[in-house]
Image: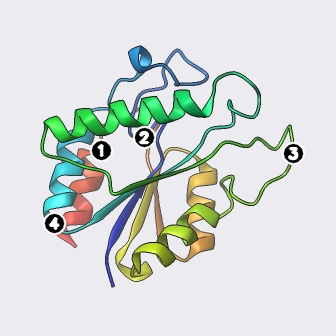
Amino acid sequence: MKKAIFLDRDGTINSDEGHYYIYKVEDFVFNPGVIDGIRRLNEAGYLIIVVTNQGGVAKGEYTIEDVDNLHAHMCKELEKHGAHVDKIYYCPHHSSIAPCKCRKPSPYMIEQAIREFDIDKSASWLIGDGSRDIEAAEAAGIRGIKIPKNSDLTPVIDSILKQ
């Protein structure tokens, strides 16, 4: 079984300051400690799995192609620094449009990754900036760590790596 770090995207991996939705490459800015932290977690043998709600797709604010382009940009930038994400799961739905099974706080995306990658829940965490992130983690049986929005990930990653 493998150990994993699940990361929320907006507000955790990247800053969402000044934007309701981040879907343009030019608006994407990594939060402090993210690039180095992901690289360090990669080196320590953790899978890095992104789980993100992208409800703006359902609302018609942006497209799945916009999400895919932004994720490709994010991954390319990480790779320039010797870091990588193993998989990105996202929910393009929004509860104001129609119910779905994948939108956090549902544990669906996390559970999908656990099955796909044979992840050891007891050796895995989710880091996110919202209560729905933590609710999803707990419902999936992994530990959740809530951080302040757009904060430096270094202290949290240091803490995980010391365990």
Q: Residue at the spot x=84%, y=51% of the render?
A: 99
SS at badge 4: loop
* Residue 36 in the image: above or below residue 137: above
Where does residue 131 sit, x and y in percent of width and height? 61, 51
* Labels 2 & 1 near each other (Cβ < 8 A): yes
Label 4 near label 3: C-beta < 8 Å?
Answer: no
Quick one: 61 or 121, which is closer to the camera?
Answer: 61
Looking at the image, what colour scheme do you see? rainbow
Q: Place residue 69 in its image quadrant.
A: top left
Q: Residue 153 appears at what percent x and percent y? A: 30, 44
Residue 12 marker: 2
Residue contact between numbered discs 2 and 4, judged by CB atoms under 8 Å: no
* Label 1 Cα crowd, 10 Å radius (few <14 / some 14-19 / many 20+): many
Q: How far apart are labels 3 and 4 at the CA level?
A: 40 Å
Q: Earlier in the sequence, mark 3 or mark 2?
A: 2
* Residue type beneath disc 4: Ala
Q: Which badge, 1 or 3, is on the more N-terminal residue?
A: 3
Residue designated by label 1: 153
- Image coordinates of residue 104 in percent, x first then y, are 65, 54
Q: Nearer the viewer, residue 80 or 142?
A: 80
Q: Which residue is mark 4?
A: 44
Q: How far apart are the two marked residues, 1 and 3, measured between alpha carbons?
A: 33 Å
Among numbered discs 2 and 4, the one appearing first in the sequence: 2
Q: Amino acid at mark 1?
A: Leu
User: Which comes sooner in the sequence, label 4 or label 1?
Assistant: 4
Label 2, secondary structure: give it: loop
Q: Nearer the viewer, mark 1 or mark 3?
A: 3
Residue type at tag 2: Thr
